[in-house]
């Protein structure tokens, strides 16, 4: 004999099984596995966060050089690399903060 609570749980489980799995939730669940060390989880979270964008220190370094040297700063290899690391959103921020219009 099953209770109404058990039947409700079974219906909820069946409904959940029909729903598509969220890739972000699956990625985070994988980090909770006993075989994933804290160091590894931390590295994976950071790698995911910075994928397609540069660290804030990179943005700050580029803004500083652009303010000091103008567009000539982009002739330096380090700044050219920094520029290539930026996301579109970060590039817009650099343009706004420096008053320049930089395109890739």
Image: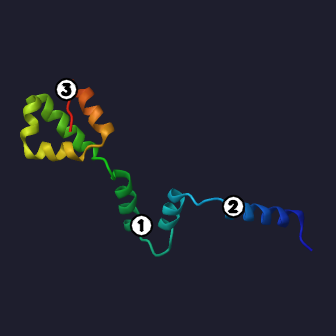
The quarter of the picture where the C terminus appears is top left
Residue located 32% across and 50% down the image: 52
Q: Is residue 18 above or below residue 63?
A: below
Quadrant location, the N terminus? bottom right
Residue 62 in the image, given as x and y percentages of width and height? 18, 38
**Which of the two discs, 2 and 1, labels the residue nearer the N terminus?**
2
Location of residue 80 in the rendering, given as x and y in whole percent from the top left corner: 14, 43
Q: CA distance from mark 2 to mark 1?
A: 30 Å
Figure check: 20 above or below 63: below
Instruction: Single out the mark in the foreground, 1 or 3.
Output: 3
Residues tagged 2 and 1 counted as in contact (Cβ below 8 A): no
- Describe the element under mark 1 as helix, strand or loop: helix
> Comparing marks 2 and 1, which lies closer to the viewer?
2
Q: Quadrant of residue 40?
A: bottom left
Q: CA distance from mark 2 to mark 3?
A: 51 Å
Residue corresponding to mark 2: 16
Q: Which is more N-terminal, label 3 or label 1?
A: 1
Would you name the residue on which mark 1 appears? Answer: 38
């Amino acid at each position: 004999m099953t209770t109404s609570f058990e039947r409700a749980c079974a219906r909820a489980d069946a409904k959940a099984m029909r729903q598509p799995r969220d890739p972000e939730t699956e990625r985070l669940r994988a980090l909770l596995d006993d075989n994933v060390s804290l160091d590894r989880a931390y590295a994976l979270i950071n790698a995911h966060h910075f994928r397609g964008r540069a660290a804030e220190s990179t943005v700050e370094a580029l803004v500083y050089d652009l303010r000091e040297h103008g567009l000539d700063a982009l002739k330096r290899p380090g700044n050219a690399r920094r520029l290539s690391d930026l996301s579109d959103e970060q590039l817009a921020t650099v343009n706004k903060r420096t008053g320049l219009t930089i395109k890739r």
